[in-house]
Image: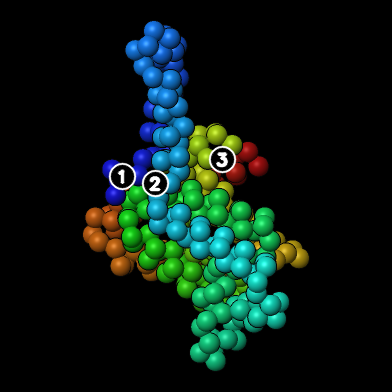
Amino acid sequence: MEESIKTEAQFVHKQFLFLLKLPWYLLLVLFGKKSFAELFQPLRELVHFLLEPKLTIFLIVLNVGMFIYTMFFMPEETLRNLVFQPGQLSQLNFIPMIVSWFLHASIAHLLGNMFFLYIFGRILERRFGYKMLFIYFGAAVISDLFASLFAQGGIGASGAISGLVAAAILTDPFYITFLVFGVPIPILLLGWLSIFSDIFGVLSPEETNIGYLAHLGGYLSITLLVYFLNPEEKQRMKKGLIINLILVAVLVALYFLFK
């Protein structure tokens, strides 16, 4: 699976080399040694790169498709009944919990979730293949159960994506993403920015529809889901955990140093 899905750093490096060679390629095209169509190779590679993580794309299509359906075809009353509420669990009504993973309150809510799903889903799919779906849906279940302990429900894929975030920063902490405004950012840093944001949201509650507790449940879900991985995958996450703990210790030390 790692060979079939390139890292963003590999893709950017290849395109950078193409740009360096572009003046030479233009001369070859001018003298008929290369076809003009070959100059569009980076564009074809970009499309291929974006569509490589097929499972991640599948999840995005499901979420977008459900959003379109709920906006234009689903009665409002039906939609309200599909919002996950903790009391539904005691009634053994699990349908709202499952359906709610694919419901979003607005286009901004959807786009934000799909953006993070693509970044972290790509990393996990590259490393785990189909097990990425296990982590995604396992985190979705655990995040909802965790939030229900505090009498909170809701909609959205955030809990499932939080599980991907936690798994990604443990599995591939030094993976570099260029998808945030084209700036190279270690996935470890991006993941912890997300985690700290949710922790702050829980500690400083405001009037908001953001399910911070569900997000935290998604992050914590990996502590259970890791037991279903093979020994090599577990060992990789243990090493990633050490790296993450060192980072957190450094950040905490810097906070008190400069405070």
- The Cα–Cα distance between marks 3 and 1, rounded to whole angstroms, is 23 Å
Judge whether 259 appears above or below 204 on screen: above
Query: Do the CB atoms of the residues marked 1 and 2 lie less than 8 Å apart?
Result: yes
Question: Dot 2 surroundings within 10 Å: few (below 14), some, or many (20 or more)?
Answer: some
Task: Assign a secondary structure to mark 3.
Answer: loop
Q: What's the mark number on residue 4?
A: 1
Q: Which amino acid is tagged 3?
A: Val
- The numbered disc on residue 180 is 3
Where does residue 163 sit, x and y in percent of width and height? 46, 61
Number of labels in the image equals 3
What is the secondary structure assignment of the residue under circle 1?
loop
Residues under labels 3 and 2: Cα distance? 19 Å
Rendering coords of residue 8 (x, y %) = 43, 38
- Quadrant of res 199: bottom right
Amino acid type at circle 1 is: Ser
Q: Tell me the crowding category of disc 3: few under 14, some 14 to 19, or many 20 or more residues within 10 angstroms, Cα based.
A: few
Identify the disc placed on residue 140.
none
The residue at which mark 2 appears reads as 52
